[in-house]
Image (cartoon, rainbow, N blue to C red):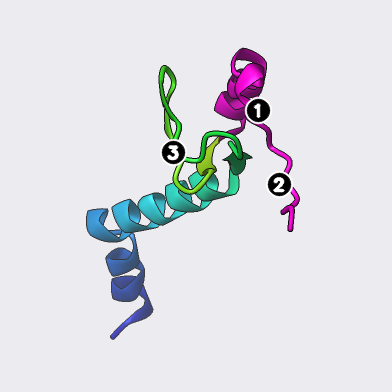
Amino acid sequence: MSTTRKNQQDKSPENTEAAERAEDTKTVSSSLVEVYSPAFPQLLVTSPKVEFVDGVALVSKTVAVKLEKSFASFGITRKKPTSVE
């Protein structure tokens, strides 16, 4: 296969879209943070929609800040709680 043909294949719409999706996935996953709700481990917040499972939810940094401010009385925090034994 010639180099020119290989370069044309690499720039096909399918390859470009796949590369963009992969890059989007990397960006999204790197911008997510864990938020903890030790007092209410199954808490469901409806706005912004966040569902805690076993006291942990994965959200964007922006949502994490909003949750900490708005739901401080529920004990929501970005700091991992220490286990009490």
Q: From the image, tell me which residue sits under label 3.
A: 42
Q: Which mark is residue 80?
A: 2
Is residue 37 shown above or below 84? above
> Circle 2 sits in a helix, a strand or a loop, which is it?
loop
Q: Position of residue 43 (x, y in %)?
A: 45, 32
How far is the residue under mark 1 from the one under mark 2? Answer: 12 Å
Residue at coordinates 65% horizontally, 18% vertically from top-left?
73
Residue flagged by tag 2: what amino acid is it? Lys
Is residue 79 shown above or below 19? above
User: Where is the N terminus found, in terms of image quarters?
Assistant: bottom left
User: Where is the C terminus found, in terms of image quarters?
Assistant: bottom right
How far is the residue under mark 1 from the one under mark 3? Answer: 13 Å
Numbered disc in front, either 3 or 2: 3
Q: Position of residue 51 (x, y in %)?
A: 41, 35
How far is the residue under mark 3 from the one under mark 2? Answer: 16 Å
Near mark 2 (Cα within 10 A), the count class, few <14, some 14-19 or many ≥20, is few
Is residue 51 shown above or below 17? above
As drawn, is 84 to the left or to the right of 19? right
Residue at coordinates 37% horizontally, 78% vertically from top-left?
3
Task: Write the start and end of the magenta stretch as one range.
Answer: 60-85
Q: Earlier in the sequence, mark 3 or mark 2?
A: 3
Q: Residue furthest front?
A: 85
Residue flagged by tag 1: what amino acid is it? Gly
User: Is 32 covered by the magenta stretch?
Assistant: no
Q: Badges 1 and 3: C-beta atoms under 8 Å apart? A: no
Q: Which mark is residue 75?
A: 1
In depth, the one of 78 and 30 nearer the eye is 78
